[in-house]
Image (tube, rainbow, N blue to C red):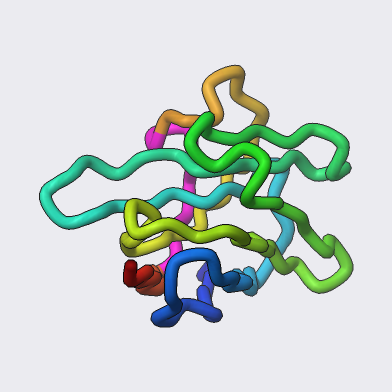
Amino acid sequence: QVHMVESGGGSVQAGGSLRLSCAASRGFYRMGWFRQAPGKEREGVAAIDRGGDSTYYADSVKGRFTISRDNAKNTLYLQMNSLKPEDTAMYYCAAAIFYSREWRLEQEYNYWGQGTQVTVSS
């Protein structure tokens, strides 16, 4: 049984920062963060491959968010700076066993966390 538990969400004012964490019960090749705002489809935010040298970001978060991982702890992080109201969403971590060219596709990920809410007020 694989477990993935997110933490670090909360409420913050625009311009503030939050750091999300996702603790997994085992290691994976690729780990990523997705988010879903009310009334919208879930979208890929960022992903990182096992070695940490390959990272991927949505255009909307480039330069503001940083994804990282600690393989010794099987933990994924998302440092979110300069937060905007449009970043408000439920954030989910996801894990993929194998490499895929399409990091944004939900179906490429095998396991998901339960989500953590991020709310940014203006």
Q: Which residue occupies the foreground of this view, 14 or 8? A: 14
Residue 114 appears at what percent x and percent y? 37, 70
- Which picture quadrant has residue 23? bottom right
Is residue 18 magenta-colored? no
Q: Is residue 12 above or below residue 46?
A: below
Using the rendered view, name the quadrant where residue 27 is placed. bottom right
Residue closer to the observer: 59 or 23: 59
Identify the residue at horizontal 67%, vertical 41% (top origin). Answer: 63
Tell me where residue 111 appears, x and y as whole percent.
47, 54
How many marks overall? 0
Is residue 98 visible in the rendered image? The answer is: yes
In depth, the one of 25 and 30 nearer the eye is 30
When asked about the image quadrant of residue 54, the answer is top right
**Furthest residue to the left?**
39
Q: Is residue 3 visible?
A: no
Compared across the picture, whether 101 is left or right of 86 comes to right
- Quadrant housing the C terminus: bottom left
Instruction: Tell whether 107 sits left or right of 48.
Output: left
Q: Residue at x 11, y 49 (%)?
A: 39
**Residue 20 to residue 32: above or below:** below
Q: Residue at x 40, y 81 (%)?
A: 11
User: How far from the left and from the top, in percent, is residue 10?
Assistant: 43, 81
Q: Is residue 87 above or below residue 47?
A: below
What residue is at 72 percent from the left and 68 percent from the top? Answer: 75
Does residue 23 sit above or below 105 in this rendering?
below
* Magenta range: 106-113
